[in-house]
Amino acid sequence: MSAMSRNKGKAGEREIAVLLADLTGCNVRRRVRQRDGDSDLEGLPGWSVEVKRHAKATRATVAGWWNQAVRQAEADGGIPVLFWRQDRDEWRAVWPLAVSLTMQQAAMWSGYEWTAEGSIEAWAAIYRELIPMNNQSAQGQWDTDILASLSESVSFEDMGFDRVDVEVMFAGDPRVDVDSIFKDTPEQEETKGALEEIKAERAEMKKSKQAQQSADHYLTVVCKDAEEKAALNKHLGIPKGELYVSPAEIFAMRR
């Protein structure tokens, strides 16, 4: 892999980490030191993340990435999720359809044919939906009085809780100030500072895509019958059978 490809991959991991942190409220960050089998991102409990950022991606390419994500998840012990983006396009997410099914088969957790694909916003909705099932703290089984007292001498992070856990357990509880407990590191602050820039870029990308797909720049001429259409084509010099013609081609034919 070239240095340019590695740098593009690292930039992609930082970009998606910022977006996911904003969507989930978790302290999502790029794993700096990665070994084979490690999730590319940290901060999404229960999930093993594979991130791919390439110029172009075919369906076969995405399927290959998914297989890599599954192997990584098997080593990491989490649910596989693939985040990928190609140039001048938005991020996409691929995850096992099995997370939303009650009747399951083993293949549903690994086979690409058993995946769901959507926007990162769609995956984040799935992630939030699964929090009550995957986190004991979200089920209301913790004694918050004991935890609040214990937190005076032991940090919530040392107890194994992340920001989302504490927010769920102590929502509206004046004894626990989540913002002061989970302070951002300088790297996290810098990453969050880039969030608005990334959002603006995505909004501009979406606007450009909508403009490209808009029908506002089409002009439809309706002929009363085939004979009139043939006469119009002959007058304008449009070849028989041609369905789409640009203004430049018509101007050139009329010269």
Image: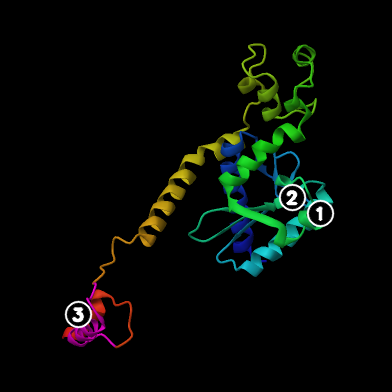
Which mark is on residue 105?
1
The quadrant holding residue 29 is top right
Q: Considering the numbered disc 1 on the image, is that residue within a helix, a strand or a loop?
A: loop
Q: Residue at x 64, y 21 (%)?
A: 178
Q: What is the span of residues highlighted in magenta in the rendered image?
A: 222-239
Q: Position of residue 43 (x, y in %)?
A: 70, 38
> Is residue 189 shown left or right of residue 248?
right
| Tag 2–tag 1 contact (CB < 8 Å) | yes
> Height in image: 174 above or below 11?
above
Work out whether 213 lies above or below 237: above
Residue at the disc numbered 2: 98
| Element marked by disc 3 | helix
CA gap, disc 3 and disc 1: 61 Å
Q: Is residue 126 magenta?
A: no
Q: Which mark is residue 251?
A: 3
Q: Tell me if 21 is positioned left or right of 147 in this view.
A: left
Residue kind at label 1, given as amino acid type: Gln
- The residue lying toward the viewer, choosing from 22 and 79, is 79
**Residue type, numbered disc 2:** Ala
What residue do we see at 75% from left, 26% from top?
A: 139
Residue 180 is situated, as x and y percent measured from the top left of the image, at 63, 20
Taking the view exactly as shown, the residue that stands out farthest to the front is 225
- Real-space CA distance between mark 2 and mark 3, rounded to the nearest whole angstrom: 56 Å
* Alpha carbon distance from label 2 to label 1: 8 Å
x and y, in percent, of residue 24 in the image:
61, 37
Reply above or below: 10 against 143. Answer: below
